[in-house]
């Protein structure tokens, strides 16, 4: 039985953190592992999904085989799969388990339309003034022991 989906060309897959609790319920292991998701273009998405379903029905594990950023071959067990038809062709979304040590988190932000470099802003533009308490309720007497 062919229990591997292999990425044969292109860059290494991009894994994203999963914020869906249902996916973590599929992972039971004594090892700490994270569930991540990747989206891949494919020639025949329904056939790949069918291979996954057949393997899982027979209690086999399907693997995603890929090369990492250094070109070293790696494997990750697939725990869920979905096919989507897009304008660019077939896409498969794969939820895979990877050891916690292989997870690299990248933080970023997108700038919105407001430009914080302008000198025409103040804290009151961002905070509700009703929450500000500008009165000094503390006693002027020094603290005594």
Image: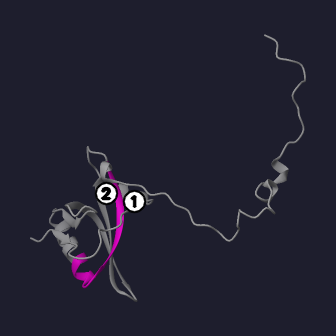
Q: Secondary structure at mark 1?
A: helix
Query: Residue at position x 88%, y 42% from top?
Result: 134
Query: Residue at position x 23%, y 60% from top?
Result: 77
Mark 2 near mark 1, Cβ–Cβ under 8 Å?
A: yes
Residue 41 counted in the magenta span: yes
Q: Give the x, y percent position of residue 79.
A: 28, 62
**Quarter of the view holding residue 92:** bottom left
Q: Which residue is mark 1?
A: 22
Q: Give the x, y percent position of residue 140.
A: 90, 23
Q: Secondary structure at mark 2?
A: loop
Q: Which residues are magenta?
A: 33-49
Residue 34 counted in the magenta span: yes
Q: CA distance from mark 2 to mark 1?
A: 7 Å
The residue at the far bottom in this view is 87
Query: Residue at position x 80%, y 56% from top?
Result: 122
Q: Give the x, y percent position of residue 9.
A: 23, 76
Quadrant containing the N terminus is: bottom left
Q: Which residue is mark 2?
A: 26
**Quarter of the view holding residue 113:** bottom right
Query: Residue at position x 25%, y 76% from top?
Result: 49
């Amino acid at each position: 039985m062919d229990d591997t989906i292999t990425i044969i060309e292109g860059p290494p897959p991009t894994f994203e953190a999963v914020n869906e609790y249902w996916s973590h319920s599929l992972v039971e292991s004594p090892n700490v592992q994270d569930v991540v998701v990747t989206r891949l273009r494919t020639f025949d998405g329904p056939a790949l999904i069918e291979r996954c379903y057949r393997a899982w029905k027979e209690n086999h594990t399907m693997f995603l085989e890929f090369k990492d950023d250094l070109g070293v071959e790696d494997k990750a067990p697939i725990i869920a799969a979905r096919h989507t038809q897009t304008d660019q062709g077939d896409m498969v979304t794969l939820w895979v388990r990877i050891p916690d040590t292989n997870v690299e988190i990248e933080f970023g932000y997108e700038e919105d339309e407001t430009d914080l470099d302008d000198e025409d802003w103040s804290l009151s533009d961002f905070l509700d003034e009703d929450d500000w308490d500008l009165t000094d309720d503390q006693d002027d007497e020094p603290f005594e022991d």
